Amino acid sequence: MNPLLPKCLGSFILLLGFLPSLSASSHREAPLIADDPLADNTDVYAFVSPDDPSTVTIIANYIPMQLPQGGPNYYTFGEDIRYEIHIDNDAAIKGDEITYRFTFDRLNEDPTTFFNVRLGAENIKATYTLERSLNGGMSFDTILRNGICPAYNIGPRSIDGMVGLDSTYLEVWENAVAVTTSGEMVFAGPADDPFYVDLGGIFDLGDSPRQGSDANSRDGLSQFNVHTLALKIPVNVLKKAGAPASPTSILDPNYVIGVWASASRPAVRTIVSGDSIVDSGEYVQVSRLGMPLTNEAVIPIGMKDYWNAITPYMELDDTTLDTYFYNPELALYMDTAFFASAVPAFMPLRIQQNSLGAFDFTNTADGLFGLKGDPALDGTALAEAAFGGLLLPGPGMPRSVDLWPIFHTGVPNLAPYQLATGKNGDPLAMGKPFINNFLPNGGDMLRLNMAVPPTPRTSESFSSLGLVQAAVLGLTDPAFAGSDSLQFIPNMDGFPNGRRLEDDVTRIELQAVSGVVLAAIGLWYDDYDPAVDSSPVTDGLLNVLGYTTEVEANDVPFRQAFPYVAMPWRGTEVNHTNFAE
């Protein structure tokens, strides 16, 4: 196998953009929420628990870019915010089937001191109530009261010393893991920010990887903390009502869930005096998140606050935002007819303009729309009798067949959404089954097929490229490429089939915008000529597969046990001062 191949092959998503006021993944991604960090979603993760495949772990992070040394008032969840994790498992019902709601209280145990921790007492100490709805939010049951948020990891005197908590931070942190009355494991508290990306390079007009002999790419979120909500939920709670007790296959459609998170505030806030605030009115959603990088890099700045205010289900009726997925801005910087020359870091990334001598996927081109109504589409997801109206909505919308459905419907186990293995050069033919996380019941959500087994994190086969690596193996490894039947391929449980903490979503999404997912299903790059080339692994494909941002892992290892995120950085151990080049 070509040594570059294991480094990528397309996943199905979008992007990183060029709006200099933003940060990634969803850190400070919209004008209004940038002024309200306590309610700001940063990332959402959903994956089959690697140490217990009978459960799924969902993680929602909030409060971006926390300095670990940020005293005297250290970060914690807001008292006047509803933090919610939403689960959809039935395409026949519009809206959530399951909702988990966290609400927090804060207490100063010793208001006579300016220290956050002293003599066993904590100030700004947070506790929480966890409620669960199984009927679409019509009613909620309390499943945990007085849940404990661990103290912030201030330093050795505050945590380990006798004048502080007289403990270890590991003990303080792990003691915050609780079990609800309905059997979920839960954690709410500070953690290392698990997202990794070269913020400085990306938002310096796309300088990732950084160009020049003296330029060093670096993780812009290294040594920053976030606040994590983590739930470990039995699959039997999450699966569709009436689904069989165990999956019929690893692509069982009854085991697909959609996951998103939100934060809501009361509609009215009255400041009575300097230290008195009264909130009233209905709760209003001010932030949401499902897929990474949607609002900050797909939605234009004039629509970002609007996007945060609506639910994924409202996107079914309001197609205003669809155009930004059909013709993503980032694609302009990968197209030599537009602005590719202005972004040299993206030189390896190019989009098919003449795939198989017929199909152009650059912005405003027609993609596969010219086939609409053609009998060749019969039996595929693109047929009018199937989802043709959704996936081939009109001319000039080339990415309606790959980028748009990943955000809005997921991918069905139908042609053309199968690996090119077994297609014999016809991208519309049935190929090797690869993914089924189809849930056409809303807009932007993580979609996860819980029937797909987890790849062990300690396995040599584990890869942060998720479905990218699984596709590479399915197309090139004789153990998988020799058969067009369904097989479990390592990392089929990875992004965008859910999202694991380790998944390198930045690199995957940049390659996906460059059309790698189209290549994976047989719509090869322009320099492939089947009359001449014995293999579609041409220079054009290899250039895209070899692309890297040079930031490919988190700054610290993840834990092997729930809640899996790493413990927060200690305030006395970090250094954010020497960043000048």
Image (cartoon, rainbow, N blue to C red):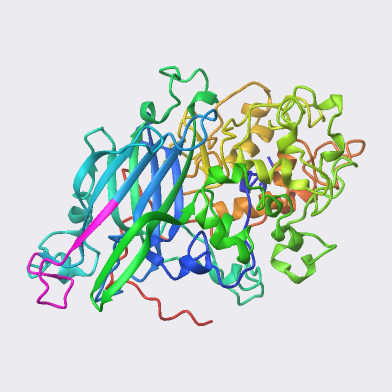
Q: Residue at x 30, y 49 (%)?
A: 102
Pick the front one: 502 or 19? 19
The residue range painted magenta reads 103-120
Residue 568 percent across, percent down from the top left: 31, 61
Residue 179 percent across, percent down from the top left: 23, 39
Residue 561 percent across, percent down from the top left: 31, 43
Residue 477 percent across, percent down from the top left: 65, 33
Pick the front one: 116 or 275? 275
Query: Is 572 displayed left or right of 43 in the figure?
Result: left
Magenta: main secondary structure equals: loop
Q: Residue at x 30, y 67 (%)?
A: 75
Q: Is residue 105 above or below residue 339?
A: above
Pick the front one: 112 or 142? 142
Q: Any magenta on residue 110?
A: yes
Q: Residue at x 70, y 60 (%)?
A: 330
Residue 550 visible somewhere in the drawing: no
Query: Is 196 displayed left or right of 147 in the figure?
Result: right
Identify the image quadrant of the C terminus.
Answer: bottom right
Q: Is residue 441 above or below residue 338?
A: above
User: How many labels, in total?
Assistant: 0
Q: Is residue 212 above or below residue 96?
A: below
Residue 15 visible somewhere in the drawing: yes
Identify the image quadrant of the N terminus.
Answer: top right
Query: Is 390 displayed left or right of 128 in the figure?
Result: right
* Residue 246, image quadrant: top left
Q: Any magenta on residue 42?
A: no
